[in-house]
Amino acid sequence: MAEQQSIVKDLAHVVVLLILILVLLVVVTKFKVVHPSAIPGWQGVYCTYVEQKHSVVGFVYGDDGAGDPEQLVETLSKNRPSLRTELVQMRDVSPGLLSRYEVIVLEKSKTVPFRALSALEGYLDNGGSLVWTSDSLSKQVLDDRDLEEARQYNVSHPEWREQSGTGKDYYTWFLDTYQAPKGFAEFGDKFLGAFLKTQSATSSSAMMSVMRDHLIISGIQTVAIPSGTTLGVVNQNDDVNMIASVEYGKETFPAILEKKYVGRILYLAFPLEALNSKTFIDNIFDYLVTC
């Protein structure tokens, strides 16, 4: 009898241990500490029974800047037909729309209006992941819709002047604060660093591995960057890691940067499709997309 009770007790301990391990796996996967594919057999279980859905990647694009998002989506539809993708025009960006996507990719997104930038910031604060390429977000503007929304807010919140302590009404403060930003401005200060310039790749430009064991560059050591590719040159913050660098003549600058925020932020100095490497694109989405 005593032996049976001991066996039952041991089994109970094993069950509790398995439940705790399962909970831990769910937590570390949910908060993107580890990718489910890194644990044998776990991705299928997690996606089927926890998420119960497939991830969707949004490709946000505007009217100018480096990259060809339509070509990229077409390539992905052929190489990774199971990956759900949607093209999103910059003018349509809103918090509700972005919440549909596990990952946002910015290409051909040089010019960004204030409301879209604000929606992207909220998306990152709420756990989304971002692939930010080349000169995307380097020209921040206030368009007519931004100005009209600011005027409406100013009219409906007359108490703002007194409560803010600025001595200005909301509309005046809004213009003074956001009318003439430079580069990535406050968004860059918070999430990445400073945008310095763009330059065109030459025949000698190449991407070199810095963190050789990182999953993004697994199977990749040195890759030529096609001549004429628009490269973004940035100065990263201290909490941002350099995964790879660009060798440009005698100059070296970041090629791939990563910041672990709530989700993950990856900055690529070039459009995602520029390297013409299926391995590289597969690595990016294997790393960022959960299901």
Image (cartoon, rainbow, N blue to C red):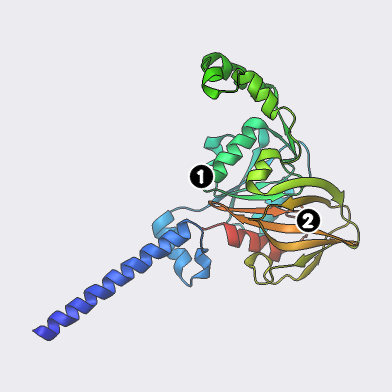
User: Pointer 2: what residue?
Assistant: 274
Q: Position of residue 85 (x, y in %)?
A: 60, 49
The three-letter amino acid code for the residue at tag 1 is: Asn
Q: Point out the frontmost of discs 1 and 2.
A: 1
For image coordinates 77% across by 62% down, the residue present is 245
| Residue at 61% over, 17% down | 151
Find residue 34 and report its horizontal and vertical position in percent: 51, 64
Relative to 102, residue 208 above or below = below
Which element is circle 2 on?
Answer: loop
Indicate the secondary structure of the residue bearing disc 1.
Answer: loop
Measure the C-alpha gap from mark 1 to mark 2: 30 Å
Residue 273: x and y in percent read 75, 55
Evaluate whether residue 134 shows in this view: yes
Tag 2: Cα neighbours inside 10 Å, few (<14), some, or many (≥20)?
some
Q: Position of residue 218 (x, y in %)?
A: 67, 70
Residue occupying image coordinates x 10% and y 84%: 2
In which image quadrant can residue 50 be found? Answer: bottom left
Q: Which residue is mark 1?
A: 126
Residue situated in front as seen by the camera: 193 or 288: 193
Residue 278 against residue 117 in the figure, above or below = below
